[in-house]
Amino acid sequence: MWKAGVSGMGIADVVILTAVAVVFALCVRTIYISNRNGCSGCDSRSVCTSRLTGRCRAADDMVRRADKALGKVSRHE
């Protein structure tokens, strides 16, 4: 059987800490990529104009369709 070291951590502790570290690293990587590419999480990133215009066409379209479905006059025309 595996014997705990000086720190008193068992194998389960090491596995859990490793998993948490990997998840944390993936989160930081996702945030970094998102900030670097602007619209990295959006399907419209190949035609994204938000950096030039300051408005996201995909978000505007989503809000316009939601307003239409709810019977509201859209401000995102």
Image (cartoon, rainbow, N blue to C red):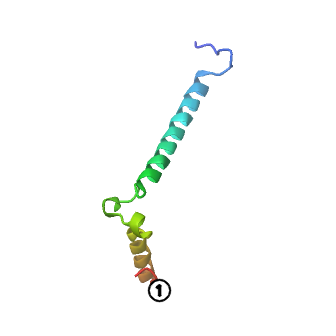
Which residue occupies the foreground of this view, 66 or 34? 34
| Relative horizontal placement of residue 71, taking residue 45 as reference (left or right) | right
Q: Amino acid at mark 1?
A: Lys
Q: Is residue 35 above or below residue 51?
A: above
Q: Is residue 40 above or below residue 24?
A: below
Residue 60 rendering spot, x and y as whole percentages: 42, 73
Q: Is residue 15 above or below residue 60?
A: above
Identity of the residue drawn at 51% across and 38% down: 25
Identity of the residue drawn at 65% across and 15% down: 5
Residue tagged by mark 1? 72
Residue 26 rendering spot, x and y as whole percentages: 48, 41
**Residue 15 in which image quadrant:** top right
Residue 18 rendering spot, x and y as whole percentages: 54, 30
Identity of the residue drawn at 58% across and 31% down: 17
Residue 34 rendering spot, x and y as whole percentages: 45, 52
Q: Is residue 53 above or below residue 31?
A: below
Residue at far left of view: 46
* Quarter containing the C terminus: bottom left
**Residue 20 in which image quadrant:** top right
Identity of the residue drawn at 51% across and 44% down: 27
Label 1 CA crowd tier, 10 Å (few <14, some 14–19, many 20+) = few
Disc 1 on helix, strand or loop?
A: loop
